Amino acid sequence: MGVTRQKHAKKIMGFYKHNFQFREPFQVLLDGTFCQAALRNKIQIREQLPGYLGGATQLCTTRCVIKELESLGKALYGAKLIAQRFQVRSCSHHKNPDQELSKKVKRKPGIPLLFIIQNTMVLDKPSPKSLAFVQKLQTNQLVPEYQKQSIVELKEKEGLVKQEGEKRRKRKRAGGPNPLSCLKKKKKKTQEGQEPSAEKKKRRKRKRNRVKAEAMQSVQKNEGE
């Protein structure tokens, strides 16, 4: 295995580890074409693939891949035997041609493609969808699923997320001002038996006027005598 190819694979796997949280064991889904190419070029998938990807791998295939290899007869009998050695997973379809599968994979971000070219395994560079996804992450336009789950778990731990079935508490609405506070303030009552100062002034003025009038009458009376 060439040093250049190892550096190439290490760089690409670093991209997926950093941006899509790839962790060991790396799950590798094998199709009929890959198994047939490995058989033809005498590549030991189980032994060589972990070294190329730089970590432990979990190899698997699907039922539709096995059925496809069976339908092609003796020509791909060896490839079918190779595929059956790995974990067989169920799928929702019965047939999926290799070319269509590659196209569908490239439409989804975060899924690398692995080929066998000229007797060597080659990890394809990140697809435009993966690059666009990472660019959005860097501009904070979206949050990846694993981070969303982490945020939810953190909120639940801190008690910020209500458990299922818990009734929502009604928030108190801000009410208007207290109607009693809108009433005009009453004037302070005078103490019992005490007249207001204005009334006192009026009485004093009337008393002074009366005294003056009596004094004038007394003077006029004296002058007349």
Image (cartoon, grey):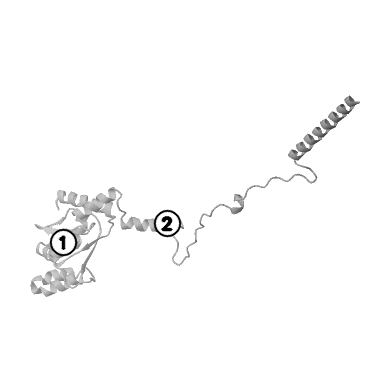
Would you place residue 128 above or below residue 32 in this image? above
Q: Amino acid at mark 2?
A: Lys
Residue 24 placement: quadrant = bottom left
Q: In the image, is 87 to the left or to the right of 210?
A: left
Residue at the outermost right position: 225
Q: Nearer the viewer, residue 71 or 35?
A: 71
Q: Does residue 13 appear anywhere in the picture?
A: no
Element type at mark 2: helix
Residue name at image x 38 percent, y 56 percent: 151
User: How far across and down, in percent of the image, does residue 215 sit?
Assistant: 85, 29
Q: Earlier in the sequence, mark 2 or mark 1?
A: 1
Q: In the rendering, which numbered label is found on residue 103?
A: 1
Q: Nearer the viewer, residue 168 or 153?
A: 168
Residue designated by label 2: 155
User: What x and y, as percent, mark residue 11?
Assistant: 21, 49
Identity of the residue furthest to the top in this view:
223
**Which residue corresponds to the image point at 22% horizontal and 66% vertical from the top-left?**
60
As shown in the figure, which amino acid type bears the numbered disc 1?
Lys
Q: Residue furthest front?
A: 224
Q: Is residue 199 left or right of residue 29?
A: right
- Residue 184 horizontal side relative to residue 29, left or right: right
Quadrant of the frame with the C terminus: top right
Question: Measuring 82% from the left and 34% from the top, which residue is drawn there?
Answer: 210
Residue 143: quarter of image: bottom left
Cα separation, mark 2 vs mark 1, equals 38 Å
Q: Secondary structure at mark 1?
A: helix
